[in-house]
Image (spheres, rainbow, N blue to C red):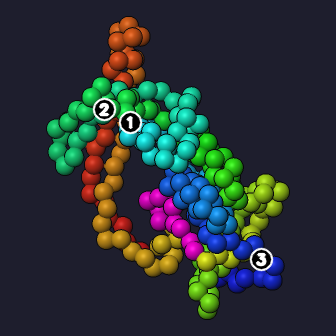
Amino acid sequence: MSPAPAPGAETYDVVVAGGGPAGCAAALTLARAGRTVLLADAGTGPPKVGETLVPAGRVLLGDLGVADRVLGSGHLPCYGNLSAWGSADLHAVDFINDPHGHGWHLDRRLFDRRLRDASREAGAAVAEGTAVRGAVRQPDGAWALALRGGTGPAGTGTGGERTVCCRWVIDATGRAAAIAVRCAVVSSQRWSVNFCPHRLHTGRSASRSAARRRSSSASARAYWRR
């Protein structure tokens, strides 16, 4: 689809594609800086499970002013990480030595939803269930973007397809890099990291089980090309 701006099309300074942590952080920061922002969250794909936030994440969320709101409830504490990078050997990091305290086993749906709510309250328009399906650079340097699905930026129930215009586009669609790929921006190499939580209950007492909550991660090289 090759979008062309229609008369009266919605216009923003920035459109952020992707409503995860990166997209929400960008939308939140830009909205607070006085920019007009549309955060388009497709909300597709399987639920993200087994993800862990390290203790330093509290500092980053604190810089955004949303740490208590996002982490206050709904997540389980994580007391350490086990990781294997390039070999089968596990390296342990216990958060008892971390000045920021424990980490968190995240409920990602809850985590992302709270970040989107914070972006909305900061002044960003949030279009949930909305994917950016086309991006065309205009002669004046602006962008025309084709959006599909969703509730509309103000929750008005406007679905289907529509075109919006903006000066800047931020691709925060994660590993898919949906906008970058469509615009022929190619990365030659990246690391793919898979996370899985350790069993939370081992048959021991609840207190000892809780004390052993840790996450594990392993890495492998992965390539992608257009």
Q: Position of residue 206 (x, y in %)?
A: 41, 10
Q: Is residue 15 above or below residue 59?
A: below
Question: Which is more toward the observer, 180 or 72?
Answer: 72
Mark 2 vs 1: CB contact within 8 A: yes
**Tag shown at residue 55:** 1
SS for tag 3?
A: loop
Residues 124 and 208: in front is 124
Query: What amino acid is found at the position of numbered circle 3 in the picture?
Result: Ala
- Disc 1, SS: loop
Q: Which quadrant would residue 103 be assigned to in this image?
A: top left
Find disc 3 in the rendering and name its residue.
Answer: 9
Q: Residue at x 52, y 39 (%)?
A: 67
Asked if residue 164 lies left or right of residue 19, the reply is right
User: What residue is shown with label 2?
Assistant: 98
What amino acid type is highlighted by mark number 2? Asp
**Residue 101's x, y, as percent?**
37, 29
Residue 192 image point, x, y percent: 33, 54
Residue 172 is a magenta residue: yes
